[in-house]
Amino acid sequence: MTGTDREITEALLVLADGTVFEGEAIGATPPEGVQVGEVVFNTVLSGYQEVITDPSYAGQIITFTAPHIGNYGVNPDDYESRRPFCQGVIVRDLARRRSNWRATGDLDGLLRQHGIPGIAGVDTRRLTRHLRDLGAMPGAFGTADEATLRAAAAGATGTDGIDLVATVTCDEPHTIPSTGGARRIVAYDFGIKATILRHLSGLGEVTVVPASTSADDVLALSPDGVFLSNGPGDPEPLTGIRDQITDLLGRVPVFGICLGHQLLAGALGAETFKLPFGHHGGNHPVRNLATGSVEITSQNHNYCVADGSIPSADLTHVNLNDGTVEGLRCRDVPAFSVQYHPEAGPGPHDSRYLFGEFEDLMAAGARKVRG
């Protein structure tokens, strides 16, 4: 069941390879009963509101592997951005009733409010295994007939080669007041999450700037450090952003997360490639090569930096599931980055020390200037 007072409307999900899944329509009604996007899966057990409102999912349809979604409702404090940017949501069972003292609404209502369609009642275990074996792929879902959905799925293009950052970045610079620190930080908004901003504001005042902001305009703000945020899609078409990062390197300390990590690596000459089904979840093990410790991390990306493609940087973190690059630190300039999400919204807190390392990098830069 998808609700206590809602009429059930049958819906279908059709993948680009022709595989069909039956379900029930939830959320908003898509135009002409068809919604398309790249179908991926996320393995978190909770934090569905944070996942859905993460701008890094622009262009994608999120499959939740946890069978029961919506149990504790939604609330204004758990938004990671001003609105969801995902193309849709796929769940096994949408909770009939919410139960949590923080809840001010339910998940179906949030989807309707922001025009996000969804489909419930899907065999998400079968779907996840299919995507695991064959890779993330475009799909179409909705209340249209199967032939229409098949044609839409076959014609969908996925996220490769598309500049999705332009669809999620802010229009104008804005400032987040410091909640404790004395630094001045400029944060590039490639799809930045609210939890990241909360951590950065603990280091100092944060000026959030659009993705198209030039290096000269950033440096004119006299920052102690520059942050490169997470964001959606393929880093390859973002040539202008990489050029600005190149101009910043060596002139100000830089810290990047997720897409910001890929763009920093690209500015250093690295190659990137698309993972078969991406890393999406709150339970990915990563080894810190400096300490040997294993961190359980929150992740959300489909692309990855190729190992060994940056001679001027050291590998700092490695994914223990597939051996892929999870972190790097530059040898010649004050800059480092990680592929995963140390702010963890949602997810474990093992890696939040990295914000302290950013503070250390900025402090070292300040001492150098004074000296």
Image (cartoon, grey):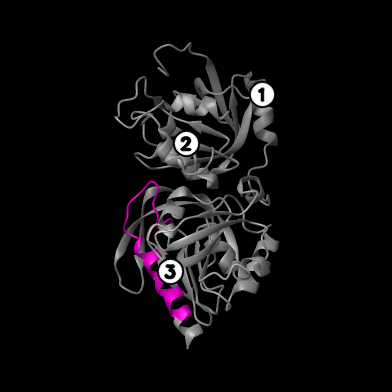
What is the C-alpha distance between the residues marked 2 and 1? 21 Å
> Is disc 3 in contact with disc 1, using a CB cutoff of under 8 Å?
no
Task: Give 110 or 242, whichever is nearer the viewer.
Answer: 110
Residue shown at the point (37%, 24%) measured from the top left: 95
Q: Picture coordinates of residue 313 (x, y %)? A: 51, 77
Q: Which residue is mark 3?
A: 358
Vertical position of residue 34 compared to residue 343: above or below: above
| Amino acid type at mark 3 | Phe
Between 164 and 213, the one lying in front of the other is 213
- Residue 11, which numbered label? none
User: Is residue 352 covered in magenta?
Assistant: yes
Residue 217, magenta (yes or no): no
Please give left or right for residue 266 compared with residue 290 in the image: right
Please determine whether, in this image, residue 121 is positioned above or below residue 314.
above
Instruction: Report helix, strand or loop for mark 3.
Output: helix
Looking at the rendering, which quadrant does residue 210 occupy? bottom right
Q: Which residue is mark 1?
A: 31
Say which mark, if any, is on residue 63: 2
Q: Nearer the viewer, residue 28 or 156?
A: 28
Q: Mark 1 falls on what kind of element?
A: helix
